[in-house]
Image: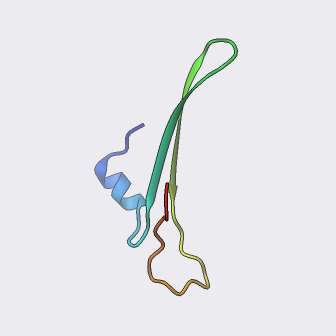
Amino acid sequence: MDFTTDKLRSLVRKWQTLIEAHVDVKTTDSYTLRMFCIGFTKKRANQQKRTCYAQSS
């Protein structure tokens, strides 16, 4: 799954982290599914720091 460069840049805001993952899953009836996940960090309402980067992914 690929996003165009301008679409990906519009999703990621300033001071955030983009987290992407993919995995191939094999079902019991021998089908292979490729699953994608995309996530972003979000600043909390009472957060003091300006940034909201992921510690590890």
Q: Position of residue 2 (x, y in %)?
A: 38, 40
Foreground residue, 3 or 27?
A: 27
Going by the picture, which residue comes out furthest to the front? 56
Q: Position of residue 25 (x, y in %)?
A: 59, 26
Quadrant of the drawing holding the N terminus? top left
- Please report the residue visible at 49 percent of the width from the left and 43 percent of the height from the top: 21
Going by the picture, which residue comes out furthest to the left? 5
Q: Is residue 25 left or right of residue 28?
A: left
Residue 11 vertical placement versus 35 (above, below): below
Q: Is residue 50 left or right of residue 6?
A: right
Going by the picture, which residue comes out furthest to the top? 29
Residue 14 vertical placement versus 45 (above, below): above
Residue 10 vertical placement versus 46 (above, below): above
In this rendering, the count of numbered labels is: 0
Q: How is the image coloured?
A: rainbow
- Please report the residue visible at 66 percent of the width from the left and 19 percent of the height from the top: 27
- Please report the residue visible at 46 percent of the width from the left and 48 percent of the height from the top: 20
- Please report the residue visible at 40 percent of the width from the left and 73 percent of the height from the top: 15
Q: Position of residue 24 (x, y in %)?
A: 53, 28
Q: Position of residue 41 (x, y in %)?
A: 51, 65
